[in-house]
Image: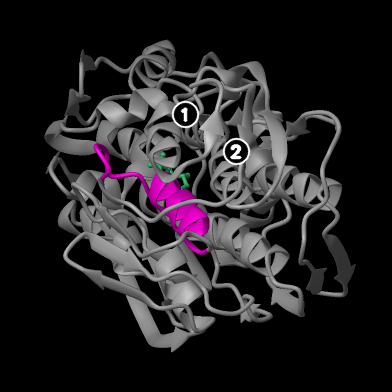
Amino acid sequence: MKVHGRAANLCGSVALAGDKSMSHRALLHAALSPARSTLRNVLRAGVTAAMIGCLQRLGVSIEQAGAELHVQGGAWQPVPDALHCGNSGTTLRLMLGAIASQPLRATLSGTPGLQRRPMQRLADPLRLMGAQIDNDFAPLTVSGGALRGIDYAIPVASAQVKAALLLAALHASGPTTLREPGPSRDHSERMLRALGVDVRSEENVVTLYPLSAALPASQVTLPADMSAAAFMLAVAVLVPGSSIQMQGVGINPTRTGFLETLQEMGADIRITNQRVEGGEPVADLEAHHSALRAVEIGGVRVVRMIDEFPIFAVLATQAAGRTVVRDAAELRLKESDRITVLAGELRQLGVALTEHADGFELHGPQAIQPAAVASHGDHRLAMSLAIAGLLAPGTTTVHGADAVDESFPGFGAVLQQLGAAVEVDPA
Ligand code: S3P
């Protein structure tokens, strides 16, 4: 992707796809039900293609009908060779938890990038529940079956680990209690509760009582993805003269750390028409170009904006004062090392910043220089670097920008529609 910089006046309304985390969960919950589910506004992107592909190989029928997906699940069938989870950590971890509770043996694999990401944080508690898992990195083989409930303190605040354990716990022989060090996203709890599952949550502790009957069908419409909205909010705030609106965006409090951070930085963000849809709070968002001041981020805020640090770093380059991020070592374990790799690519754009083991800091505002940068296969890094390029006086090339298709297909076209001079690589 090539971005011709010094953009101005990017204005319009952006229609976003459904939430990535909720799409994965909705697909899995529907796939575990023997009844026919109807899912609306499911994200169709690389990560969910991986999930859908795995489920279809397990015998689940998934059909697109207009804007709806019809899912007919039930008993999963054995698969002779590995299930490929692409580059999607959520697919691999949630599939691992779900398969652990089935009388099945399956191998889960993925891209070299996914094979580097840690699975022990999930394999350990699944082993305590009685599953057999032969490795702590993909490819790994799981032999599932009769599991027992556990009372377990998850060492890192990870919604993927929590969601996977809740899926395993659905068929365990007793209740499962999970204790988290911080408030990770709670979509699984809300969605399972809406299906009648007995899931109780209090202060980072969740207890699930196993199913006494099959999981019923899901009939859900998913809100737009806050983590995709974050990029559009950033474009509006960063580019002079801009103003962008989005409707029906999920504002679940476990996901709004970035919104709150933007507001603390002085960004003009308007949150209107707040309502609850399908058990999730949603709202319309509108952002305008704003002068920004630097903030310090640490503690529980980090997990509530865990996917937004690449774009936050770009915003920080334009904020007056010292930006500090701490308590965010988890960023090193995402689709790329979102501290070292992010810092390296921002330096290519002329940004001076200091890396910490658990974060980074920089003084702003700083000028962005046009350059050739690389996504390292990380969709959020690709989008963040492209947005940084909008601020540079010249042309910025983002190599490997096709990674955006993992979570936000059409990202380049959306920028073009807003009026940015962006060239998208041919497919
Ligand atoms: C997700 C949880 C987070 C997040 C990821 C999606 C989920 O990962 O980064 O994009 O859907 O549960 P961790 O659980 O590894 O923090």
Which sits in the foreground, 289 or 324?
Answer: 324
The answer to whether residue 311 is left or right of residue 406 is left
Point out residue 81 in the picture as x, y percentages from the top left corner: 83, 28
> Residue drawn at (71%, 37%), measured in percent from left and top?
105
Mark 1 crowd level (few <14, some 14–19, many ≥20, 10 Å Cα): many
Marks 1 and 2, how far apart in space? 9 Å
- In the shown orientation, is residue 124 left or right of residue 4? left
Does the residue at mark 1 contact the one at mark 2 (Cβ under 8 Å)? yes
Assign a secondary structure to mark 2.
helix
Task: Identify the residue at horizontal 31%, vertical 49% (top origin).
Answer: 305
Q: Which residue matches tag 1?
A: 119
Q: Position of residue 120 (x, y in %)?
A: 42, 27
Please name whichever residue, 280 or 210, is drawn nearer the observer in this view of the structure.
210
Under mark 1, the amino acid is Met
The mark nearer the N terminus, 1 or 2, is 2
Q: Position of residue 10 (x, y in %)?
A: 53, 55
The span shown in magenta is: 153-170
Q: Quadrant of ligand 1?
A: top left
* Ligand 1 is within 8 Å of the C-beta of the residue at disc 1: no
Instruction: Label the magenta part by its dominant secondary structure.
Output: helix
* Residue 9 in view (yes/no): no
- In the image, residue 164 lies in the stretch drawn in magenta: yes
Question: Dot 2 corresponds to which residue?
Answer: 92
Residue 330 sits above or below residue 71 on the image: above
> In the picture, which quadrant includes the N terminus?
top right
Q: Amino acid at mark 2?
A: Leu
Find residue 321 and report its horizontal and vertical position in percent. 10, 34
